[in-house]
Image (cartoon, rainbow, N blue to C red):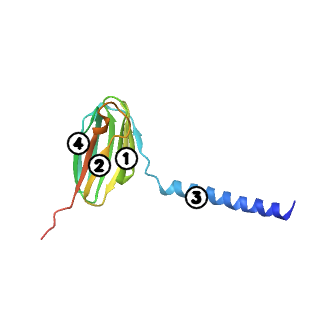
């Protein structure tokens, strides 16, 4: 075997080892994938449940051409569990500022957890074409500053 061939094989082995290491490392670090839960009709009732001062559960329901609840008020620093379902066709559930991208499919429940550190208005948009009113299908997460104790 030629010395240059040995060099190429060695470099290829190092690059391959780095690639495998980076995949295994990233797999352990980014475990914020949505969960799919068994369907239950109670998920079709939109509601916001306050578990404590900084923890909320939002049961969001998508249907032509709206999200319910349309406005979600929470204080800054809160952690929100979103349970997403649909009453009709396939819809999207996208909060681009928080890198949330879920599908709302009838008969399925998708769940993800999001932490809202800063106050502001976070737009929720449908990113799956769902019919003629698709472009106006939006909702908001309104994150407020906690009241100051003066």
Observer-nearest of 73 and 36? 73
Name the spot of residue 76 as percent of width and height, x first. 25, 59
For mark 4, does the 10 Å Cα neighbourhood hold few (<14), some (14 to 19), or many (20 or more) residues? some
Name the spot of residue 144 as percent of width and height, x first. 21, 58
Per the rendering, the mark at residue 63 is none
Secondary structure type for disc 3: helix
Eye-nearest disc, 2 or 1: 2
Per the rendering, the mark at residue 123 is 2
Q: Quadrant of the N terminus?
A: bottom right
Q: Which residue is mark 1?
A: 112
Q: CA distance from mark 4 to mark 2?
A: 10 Å
Residue 126 to residue 17: above or below: above
Q: Earlier in the sequence, mark 3 or mark 2?
A: 3
Q: Quadrant of the C terminus?
A: bottom left
Secondary structure type for disc 1: strand
Taking the image as shown, residue 108 lies to the left or right of residue 62, namely right
CB within 8 Å, label 2 to label 1: no
Q: CA distance from mark 4 to mark 3?
A: 40 Å
Q: Which residue is mark 4?
A: 70
Eye-nearest disc, 3 or 2: 2
Taking the image as shown, residue 32 lies to the left or right of residue 77, namely right
Per the rendering, the mark at residue 22 is 3
Q: Which residue is at a point 14% across and 68% down the rendered structure image?
A: 149
Taking the image as shown, residue 23 lies to the left or right of residue 147, namely right
Secondary structure type for disc 2: strand
């Amino acid at each position: 075997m030629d010395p240059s061939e040995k060099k190429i094989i060695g470099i290829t082995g190092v690059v391959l080892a780095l690639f495998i290491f980076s995949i295994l490392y990233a797999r352990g670090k980014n475990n914020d994938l949505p969960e799919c839960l068994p369907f239950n009709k109670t998920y079709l009732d939109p509601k916001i449940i306050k578990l404590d001062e900084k923890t909320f559960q939002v049961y969001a329901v998508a249907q032509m051409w709206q999200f319910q609840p349309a406005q979600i008020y929470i204080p800054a620093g809160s952690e929100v569990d979103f349970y997403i379902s649909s009453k009709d066709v396939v819809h999207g559930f996208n909060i681009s500022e928080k890198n949330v991208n879920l599908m709302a499919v009838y008969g399925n429940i998708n769940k993800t957890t999001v932490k809202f550190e800063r106050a502001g208005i976070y737009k929720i948009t449908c990113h799956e074409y769902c019919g003629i009113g698709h472009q106006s299908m939006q909702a908001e997460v309104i994150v407020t500053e906690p009241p100051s104790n003066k």
